[in-house]
Amino acid sequence: MSDLHCPKCSEPWDSAEVLPAAQGDNTCALTPSEAKKFLAGKGCPSCRWGKGRKIPCAACDGWGKGRSHGYPVVAVLCEYCKGTGEHNPDAPAWKELHEWTRRELNLQPGMVGY
């Protein structure tokens, strides 16, 4: 079978995962309700159902999982995004990193990167 492309973001989805899910198969990548939304042209999880792609968390590359030696660890949530996979500039860990970067580079208010 061939890929089906999201009408909102053109992300390819395997038709062998989408079509059975739309018929009620719960073992596919999409849930039955998600597959029906996809086939109705409302987008896909990759584009957040037509809202646009999320900015991925730089710490976990959008996986939402912690890392060990550079690889995602399924059992541990990312400390920066708390498992959402989205960039969260308000996360305490990011604020600490930003403060450290400003101190190390001696950035002053009004400078690029401040």
Image (tube, rainbow, N blue to C red):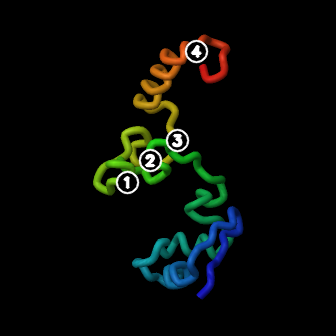
Q: Which mark is residue 72?
A: 1
> In x, y percent, where is residue 92?
41, 28
Name the residue tied to disc 2: 60
Closer to the camera: disc 3 or disc 2? 2
> In x, y percent, where is residue 28?
45, 77
Q: CA distance from mark 3 to mark 1?
A: 16 Å
Quadrant into which the N terminus falls? bottom right
Mark 1 lies on a secondary structure that is strand
Q: CA distance from mark 3 to mark 2?
A: 10 Å
Name the residue tied to disc 3: 87
Q: Which mark is residue 107?
A: 4
Query: Which label's residue is closer to the chain start, 2 or 1?
Result: 2
Q: Amino acid at mark 1?
A: Pro
Outermost residue on the left side: it is 75
Q: CA distance from mark 2 to mark 4?
A: 26 Å
Within 10 Å of disc 1 (Cα), the crowding (few <14, some 14-19, many 20+) is some
Which is nearer the eye, 52 or 79?
79
Residue 79 sits above or below residue 1 on the image: above
Which is nearer the eye, 22 or 80?
80
Q: Residue at x 60, y 11 (%)?
A: 108
Query: Which label's residue is closer to the chain start, 3 or 1?
Result: 1
Residue 95 sits above or below residue 83 on the image: above
Query: Which label's residue is closer to the chain start, 4 or 1?
Result: 1
Residue 4 sits above or below residue 85 on the image: below
Tell me if 14 is positioned left or right of 27 in this view. right
